[in-house]
Image (cartoon, helix red, strand yellow):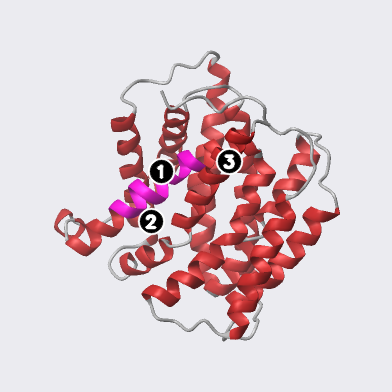
């Protein structure tokens, strides 16, 4: 792989994770006024409109059968993933969900081997996975005892599995060579379409509420940053680095969250959290240094 393209892929993945790791602050503010369904629908609607403005032209598929890939990607990466994550948060602790969602790279590897017949990464990947998970648990359960909530924890596992499926679907879409903005927008369209049944029954927010400065600011951040920009950069990274190497950057999300909590919410960085940060970053580095098969030679479309 060309070193310059690899650096672009790594930078795209890091931009994504840096933003996703801070979205909890905006979501926490919005949950005081809006429901999870309202936040989800509004943020992806803003993201969809932003991608239209960024690339105001239609995506013309070379094969109509490819439409199913975009529909599945929208269903998995937008509707089901965020739906199960929100349900999990209502049935178990946020710390449990944070840890469980971080196992998504393991499912990505498993599904790649089963469905794509790819070679399984070696010992480095699995050692890095275990080290990173140990660090994530230290961060997430810093001041809490571990508690098991079967329903909520099970829903979080489903969310992690669904995100792994989305990673494989986004990689398959990248192989089609379409413009990354147009491809991401098509995925958002199907995510919003599958979300409509819930929106019709659970959407009651008024325009004056949305236009309140603190609500509007956080919605714009989630819509333009965490949705439009981050899904583009994530899909770009998957197209360059492959689904496995991109997926393991998820380990950094709890690290960013912990640092953001210390800076914004003034939560203490205890020795346990600092050790967790070190283990998580070490596990990521170890997992990234894997000699697996060439995942993706073609560029994921263009930005032109």
Mark 1 and mark 2: Cα distance apart in space: 21 Å
Residue that badge 2 annotates: 37
Label 2 sits on a secondary structure element that is: helix
Q: Are marks 3 and 1 in contact (CB under 8 Å)?
A: no
Q: Earlier in the sequence, mark 3 or mark 1?
A: 3
Residue count near mark 1 (Cα–Cα under 10 Å), binned few <14, some 14–19, many ≥20: many
In this view, the residue in front, 271 or 19, is 271
Q: Quadrant of the N terminus?
A: top right
Label 3 sits on a secondary structure element that is: helix
- Would residue 249 appear left or right of 47 to someone viewing this image? right
| Residue situated furthest front in the rendering | 3
Residue 286 on the magenta segment = no
Q: Earlier in the sequence, mark 3 or mark 2?
A: 3
- The label on residue 27 is none
- Residue at figure coordinates x 74%, y 60% from the top left: 129
Quadrant of the rendered image containing residue 189: top left
């Amino acid at each position: 792989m060309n070193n310059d393209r690899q650096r672009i892929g790594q930078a795209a993945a890091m931009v994504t994770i840096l933003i996703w790791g801070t979205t909890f602050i905006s979501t926490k503010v919005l949950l005081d006024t809006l429901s999870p369904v309202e936040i989800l629908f509004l943020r992806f609607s803003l993201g969809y409109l932003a991608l239209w403005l960024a690339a105001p032209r239609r995506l013309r598929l070379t094969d109509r059968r490819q439409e199913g890939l975009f529909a599945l990607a929208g269903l998995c990466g937008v509707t089901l993933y965020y739906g199960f994550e929100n349900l999990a948060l209502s049935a178990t602790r946020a710390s449990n969900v944070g840890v469980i969602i971080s196992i998504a790279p393991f499912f990505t590897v498993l599904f790649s081997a089963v469905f794509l017949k790819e070679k399984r990464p070696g010992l480095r990947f699995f050692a890095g996975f275990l080290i990173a998970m140990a660090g994530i648990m230290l961060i997430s359960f810093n001041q809490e005892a571990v508690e098991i909530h079967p329903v909520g924890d099970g829903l979080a596992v489903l969310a992690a599995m669904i995100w792994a499926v989305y990673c494989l679907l986004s990689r398959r879409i990248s192989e089609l060579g379409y413009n990354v903005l147009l491809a991401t927008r098509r995925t958002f369209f199907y995510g919003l379409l599958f979300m409509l049944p819930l929106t019709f029954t659970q959407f009651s927010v008024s325009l004056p509420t949305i236009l309140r400065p603190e609500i509007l600011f956080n919605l714009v951040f989630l819509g333009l940053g965490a949705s439009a920009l981050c899904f583009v950069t994530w899909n770009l990274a998957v197209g360059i680095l492959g689904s496995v190497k991109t997926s393991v950057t998820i380990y950094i999300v709890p690290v960013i969250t912990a640092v953001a909590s210390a800076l914004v919410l003034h939560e203490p960085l205890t020795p346990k959290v600092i050790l967790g940060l070190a283990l998580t970053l070490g596990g990521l580095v170890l997992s990234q240094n894997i000699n697996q098969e060439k995942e993706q030679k073609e560029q994921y479309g263009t930005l032109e």
